[in-house]
Amino acid sequence: MCKTVPYVQGLSVAASVYSLVAVSLDRFLAIWWPLKLQITKRRARMMIVFIWIFAIVVTTPWVFFFDLVVVFEDDPNVRLCLDVWPNPLSEVLYFVIGNLIFCYILPMVLITMCYILIWIKVWRRSIPTDTQDAQMERMQQKSKVKVVKMLVAVVILFVLSWFPLYLIFARIKLGGPIQKWEEDIFPVVTPLAQWLGSSNSCINPILYAFFNKKYRKGFVAIIKSRKCCGRLRYYETIALQSSSTSTRKSWHYNNNNNPSITRRSPPVDKNAVSFIFNHTGV
């Protein structure tokens, strides 16, 4: 268990981090090239496989270098599960490259770059004011801005959640001999920092539900569904209702600006699901 538990913890953290990177990259591609680079089931599967392979590779050293260590020489039965490396240099190199860079700094840089480019694209986009598509264009841009705000909040929360723990480990691995006051405070603050970092995965769904109505409806659909792996018709109902609502709003706007058009009930597109996905960037 000494080797298994740390490895599973590190594996789940690495997979969670690069899942956020994948989501931000997907949003970047959807907003910059909405028609050319659409995500498909095949691409999604490949992305998931790549995330887990990368996480497995990055955390593999933990399987070999975690072991039970005797704490007190006069009581060999008291042991702690610690990482034991062949030499101090290999320990420092793995922490800096495998943990600090690949699991914290690099993901943070990639995600930040994606969202900066997304903001540039969204705010530079010109909105028509005299065309019949003006209201629909505003709705689409508002929807994309809401999605970006939600994901930026997720990223900021990720950075703040894991920063204390990485700061503590950086001090232990790179800061030289531990001072007496640090020996007293680290046993108290380290579990709190670990709890804060681990809680990030629990807080993300709450943020999704708070910022985005579609996620709330999706959670309800999962709860109401009887088959965990079956197709959820509830999703199609949501998409059809959303498409119908958007069409009615656009139709009402167009008719108000063109009195010569006879008012009638707007048709519901049979491809409403793909319409919502392709035209909202959500």
Image (cartoon, grey):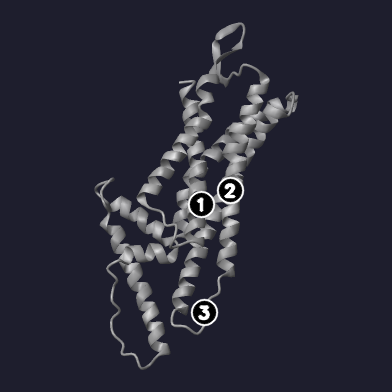
> Residue sitting at 32 percent across and 68 percent down?
241
Q: Residue furthest top?
A: 74
What amino acid type should be assigned to the residue bearing mark 3? Pro
Q: Dot 3, how many residues are within 10 Å of its Cα: few (below 14), some (14-19), or many (20+)?
A: few
Residue 106 at x, y percent in the picture:
60, 42
In the displayed structure, 256 sits above or below 35; it is: below
Residue position for label 1: 25
What amino acid type should be assigned to the residue bearing mark 2? Leu
- Asked if the residues shown at circle 2 and circle 1 are in contact, with their CB atoms under 8 angstroms apart, the answer is yes
In the displayed structure, 193 sits above or below 274; it is: above
> Residue sitting at 54 percent across and 59 percent down?
149
Q: Quadrant of the C terminus?
A: bottom left
Q: Quadrant of residue 119?
A: bottom right
Mark 3 or mark 1: which comes first in sequence?
Answer: 1
> Residue sitting at 48 percent across and 39 percent down?
15
What amino acid type should be assigned to the residue bearing mark 1? Leu
Mark 3 or mark 2: which comes first in sequence?
Answer: 2
Residue position for label 3: 128
**Residue 272 as seen in the image, left or right of residue 189:** left
Q: CA distance from mark 3 to mark 1?
A: 28 Å
**Viewer-closest of 147 and 160:** 147
Residue position for label 2: 110
Q: Quadrant of the N terminus?
A: top left
Mark 2 or mark 1: which comes first in sequence?
Answer: 1
Q: Quadrant of residue 277?
A: bottom left
